[in-house]
Amino acid sequence: VEVAQLHSGLKEKIKKELHSTAAMEARQALDSLQEEKLAQEITISSLKMELERSNEITTHLQTELENAKSLTRLSEKQFDGLKDAIRQLQVENEEKTTLNERLVENAVAEKEKMAEQFNSMNDMVEKLQKEISMLRSYNKKSEKGWFRLPNSQKESKSTTAVEGTSDDTAAAQARKWGAFGAVLPSKPLYTIKAHREDASCVMYDGTNLNLVATSSSDATVRVWDTSNGQLQATFSGGGSLPMTGVDMSGGLVTCCGADKTCRVWEYKTRRLIHQLAGHSQKITCVKLFPGEKNIVTGSADRSIRIWDISRHIYTQTTTFRHSSTANCSDVFVETQPVVTGHLDGGVRFWDVRSGDRVLDIPTLHEGGVTSVQWKPGSSHQVLTCGRDSSMKIIDVRTQSVVKTFRNSALRILSNNARCSFSPDAAGKYVACGGGDNGDVFVFDVATADLKKRLSSAHQSGVVGLAWGKGGTNGQQIATVDKSGVLVLWA
């Protein structure tokens, strides 16, 4: 009985223990499920928040997309408007281009017509001047016939004097009255050691004062009084590089050099008023325009530049370019083309207003052109000098050589050797200096014959010659040589 009770009690006890264990396990499982439920609720809440955020982003992107579509539609409308405007502008541009071409053609035709009229008038003026000269000569002979009939053997001989004596008498009369006609050089009036190194150029004052300017490799420009040979002013280039060219007119002195700069001084005050910078290599030539408001320069950088110096601050107005260096230049009047002589032997003519090359005469001189000069009183003839030791007169209208001057003793050995017409209206003579013997050669334009050869004044080769109109003293011809000597000829 006791065993049965124990056994029954043990069963009850086991049952209770089993019930408590199952309850604990159930409770643990319930707790675990509750924890998982809580975690799932948290996850669901997080996902809901992310979903809301995604919805907001999607809504924002949809708004931006609508805005972008709106901007795209607006841009397309603006683009279409711009295309229409461009198309209209193109049509207007084509119309204006056509009109401009027509106007240019009309202007060129008018210009050619005016040039022909101008050339015709110049020919008429030259013809009239010759007739006036002939009439004056006839008038003088008539006066001699009426009032000074020769009554002695001495007077009779004087009327048949040799050509040299008559030339000296005419020269004396020209000097007495100033710049009347051309004065043929006869002898050195003044021989001056102008520079300590070789000279490069000589030019008379273009306003007919008794002044002549010289430039040199000693980096100076000097101005001399032709009436007494005295130094009047010295202008320095501000360095040691050579000066290659000089010009003087209207109270201005200008020079160019190897320092790639062109300088302009006021002669009266000796003040430097402009330094024209723009060339990339040495400047080879410089020339003042008539009126002294513009300057033309040529350079080894193969450009020719026009400078406006009429204001306090200079401006570069026009640039011409060519494949060959310009050694020299000249200006006749502001409306006429600028003429330049080049290292390749060609001569070019440039329109200052349009900036175009209007005429090209290639290979005129072998070895290069060293000098160009418009004929006084003529708009269609130019004197040139070249390294082939010749001088030529070319007619711009026919683009042909009308005269050639040579002499076996004349040699041109420098790229800046200058020649010149005589300053009379007819340009009766041309002159040039010998680059080896230092002689001065004067030729008659009408016959191309050597008129005079002057020796012994220079001991080295002549590199520069100028023939001016003469001031009050009538002195007209100046030459400079490789040793820096200036000769003013009587």
Image: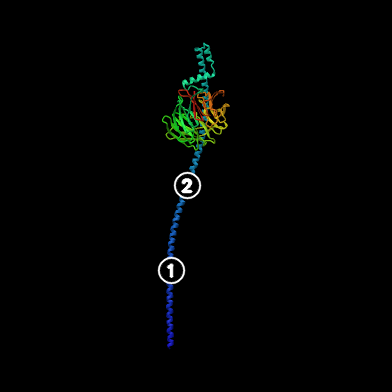
Mark 1 residue type: Lys
Foreground label between 2 and 1: 1
Q: Nearer the viewer, residue 184 or 28?
A: 184
Q: Which mark is residue 95?
A: none
Per the image, label 2 sits on a secondary structure element best described as helix
Q: Which kind of residue does numbered mark 2 sit on?
A: Lys
In the picture shown, does residue 270 fall above or below 126? below
> For this rendering, which residue is in front, 63 or 294?
294
Q: CA distance from mark 2 to mark 1?
A: 59 Å
Mark 1, secondary structure of its residue: helix
Mark 2 nearby-residue class (10 Å; few <14, some 14–19, many ≥20):
few
* Picture residue at 45% right of the left edge, 55% below the top: 61
Q: Quadrant of residue 447?
A: top right
In this view, the residue farthest toward the top is: 151
The front one of 291 and 478 is: 478
Quadrant of the image containing the N terminus: bottom left
Question: Residue 406 location, x and y as percent?
Answer: 57, 26
The answer to whether residue 82 is seen in the rendering is yes
Binning the other alpha carbons within 10 Å of mark 1 as few (below 14), some (14 to 19) or many (20 upward) gives few
| Label 2 or label 1, whichever comes before in sequence order | 1
Q: Is residue 367 left or right of residue 259?
A: right
The residue carrying mark 2 is 77
Colouring rule applied to residues: rainbow
Residue holding disc 1: 37
Instruction: Give the number of marks.
Output: 2
Residue in the picture at 42% in, 72% down: 31
The percent position of residue 271, horizontal first and vertical second, equals 42, 32
